[in-house]
Image (cartoon, rainbow, N blue to C red):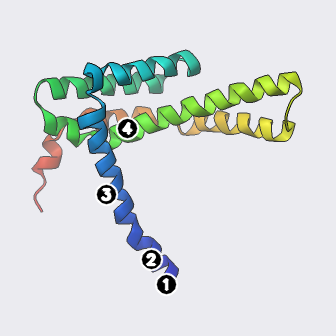
Amino acid sequence: MAQHWRDSRIAPIYEGTNGVQAIDLVSRKLPLGGGAVLDGLLAQVEIDAGDTPALAAVRRATATMHRALADGRVNDALGGATPYLRTLGVVLGDWFLQRGAAAAQCLLAAGDGNAVYLKERIAVADFYRRRLLPTVIGLESAATTGCADLLAMRF
């Protein structure tokens, strides 16, 4: 029981850290190079992992964030920061896994490496793409809705 109590007390710290990282992403990283840095990264993702509905959703969310910041609607951008961080993280996770799967396929074709391990890498990438990547589409709305509903709540 003591371990469960300790574990449950750490959850708010993790959530707070995610929020800080999300705010940093939207307020400091997203505007780098006038948005060119993240746009370049997403272009590389498309080249390597293909254009997916999830990548399209992240691009739309990114454009919405850029517009909000450019229009001085910082609170609207920050209101969607946490789901935006999640969408970007899931898409980038898929990108890394797809790159690993492609390398594993090359090694398998060449007869190099541990075939069981390489097939498992490919299976993990396939699982992620089928099961986790589609969640980005559902998070797009939360990332782009703005802050009105958040500010309407009184505690």
Query: Dot 2: what SS?
Result: helix
In this figure, which residue is indicated by the disc labeled 3?
Answer: 16
* Amino acid type at mark 4: Leu
In this figure, which residue is indicated by the disc labeled 2?
Answer: 6
- Front in this rendered view, residue 24 or 67: 24
Which quadrant of the rendered structure holds the C terminus?
bottom left
Q: CA distance from mark 3 to mark 1?
A: 23 Å
* Amino acid type at mark 2: Arg
Q: Position of residue 89 (x, y in %)?
A: 45, 38
Please report the residue visible at 30 percent of the width from the left and 33 percent of the height from the top.
Answer: 29
Which is more N-terminal, label 1 or label 4? 1
Dot label at residue 34: none
Q: Position of residue 3 (x, y in %)?
A: 51, 79
Please report the residue visible at 44 percent of the width from the left and 23 percent of the height from the top.
Answer: 41
Give neighbour class at mark 4: few <14, some 14-19, many 20+ (Cα, 10 Å).
Answer: many
Q: CA distance from mark 2 to mark 1?
A: 6 Å
Query: Dot 3: what SS?
Result: helix
Q: Are marks 3 and 2 in contact (CB under 8 Å)?
A: no
Q: Place residue 48 in its image quadrant.
A: top right
Q: Are marks 2 and 1 in contact (CB under 8 Å)?
A: yes
Q: CA distance from mark 4 to mark 2?
A: 30 Å
Above or below 3: residue 101: above
In this figure, which residue is indicated by the disc labeled 1?
Answer: 2
Q: Position of residue 138 (x, y in %)?
A: 40, 36
Q: In this rendering, which labeled residue sits more in front, label 4 or label 2?
A: 2
In this figure, which residue is indicated by the disc labeled 4?
Answer: 139
* Amino acid type at mark 1: Ala
Please report the residue visible at 76 percent of the width from the left and 40 percent of the height from the top.
Answer: 120
